[in-house]
Image (cartoon, rainbow, N blue to C red):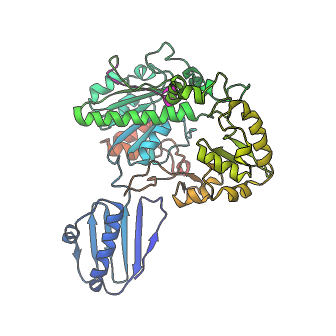
Amino acid sequence: MAYRRQGTPASTKVAYRWNSGRLLGLVQQIIPVIEQLVGKFVAKKSLEELLRKWQHDEDCLEILHCDLYLKASKSEITFELDLHLDMALKGIRVIEMAGLAPAPFCGMLLADFGASVIRVDRTETEQTGDCLARGKRSISINLKTDQGTKIVKRLCTNADVLVEPFRSGVMESLGLGPTTMLDINPKLIYARLTGYGQTSKWNRAAGHDINYVAMSGALSFLGRSKQKPTPPVNLLADFAGGGITCAYGILLALLERHRTNKGQVVDSAMVNTTMIKSIVNNGYRVDGAAYASTFIFASKLHPIFSKYAWGDQRGENLLDSGAHFYDCYQTSDGKYMAVGALEPKFYADLLRGLELDIDQQPPQNDRKSWPEMKEKLTRIFSSRTRDEWCAIFQNLDACVTPVLDHDEAGNYDINSDRDVFFTDADGVQLPSPAPRMHGKVNMPQQTKQNLSCGTHTEEILLENGFHSKEIKELIQNDIIRQASLKSSL
């Protein structure tokens, strides 16, 4: 008896169905399948407990048990299993004030691991630039009105986390500052994700990733020799120092709440990160780009590593493209290979793949020879295509890999074997959630990245105790907006 999987891996519900004969003769065949599904995807349930919930007659058998729904007739049996009911953050309720890049990324991280995330949008906006909205729902509220801010307060009464991305003082001006919100809900985790934090003299200054990385000192390390600093797109401050460290701070606060039964403020600034207990705001201060660069700052002061890895100039050191054995090289087809042969054994295999006699080359860590060796490797790598070099280094332990374009990474064997990427609702390949937890689903609950503002306004309000008549009046008075079906598609 075979079964086929209905739906896509991204579906919250996955159905298993097969054709069969009469129902009563199938019970023994059904039980192993239930064991397989329950044991593989969710916490193991007792079969006896499942069987006690069966109600059946000659024509129909039905199980409705927590994360498993089974319905069987004489001709077919259908399983629906919620793969996300056992996720790590299931049951955590998050209110995310709409923003761009770091705050949406923080919300997406929480949603990817099971949290229920509601994005609060403006009523005058139908679409935002947020492309990290998967797994979230949207409610549109006019925050310029007292009724609008009262709705946010009411939502936060039942929430675990509030994430806000505004400059210091904005939430206070709306009457939604941390003192007010923690009075309403003493268990609330109030996460503030900004550029310069809440307490510095720059706390109301505008900025973007490049500014925060520059002010952290990290940008001074990035770039080629005798060239200007090169910003790392907006990965370092917005995401590594912003979204990820804010989510980390939220998880720390949730863990501490488990012990103290109290909420707190997480002050996450993208410019610099020190994870310290702040007496000023009775919360955690989580400041990003500098913290993510701790190794660079610390290694420059280390008595051994500083002499081995660092000099005085950017782009002339061990890990910043100064060394010929830690850089990228163009191939004959205009593509690139990445070389990271730091250790002697890897360096020996690098030279072997390049058909260079190690005894005829300068010592690996002779800095004076690095420019000459870089020119030599540049000439050699330019003599073959990227695929030819991949074939040469395939069986050598040289830390040499292809530089994959973004549109080919998902199909490369190491990534496809581990499902490092998934295909979203629009057919686009995107990175899968990380880290991977054993026995859990490594797949977002919903995969559509874009979310129209106000798509779930009425649904969210009904869940939070608002009556239909009250919701209708709020819509008529432009306090909230419910997106039309057409605009939400």
Location of the N terminus by quadrant is bottom left
Residue 108 in percent (x, y) is at: 47, 43
Q: Is residue 239 magenta?
A: no
Picture quadrant of residue 143: top left
Residue 152 in percent (x, y) is at: 37, 32
Picture quadrant of residue 360: top right
297 vs 344, nearest the viewer: 344
Q: Residue at x 50, y 44 (%)?
A: 133
Residue 260 drawn above or below residue 133:
above
244 left or right of 334?
A: left
Q: Residue at x 28, y 75 (%)?
A: 31
181 left or right of 444?
A: left
Q: Residue furthest top?
A: 201
Residue 45 in percent (x, y) is at: 25, 64
Q: Residue at x 52, y 35 (%)?
A: 239
- The residue range painted magenta reads 281-292
Q: Residue at x 25, y 30 (%)?
A: 262
369 vs 335, nearest the viewer: 369
Residue 26 in percent (x, y) is at: 30, 83
Picture quadrant of residue 116: top left
379 vs 255, nearest the viewer: 379
Residue 205 drawn above or below residue 241:
above
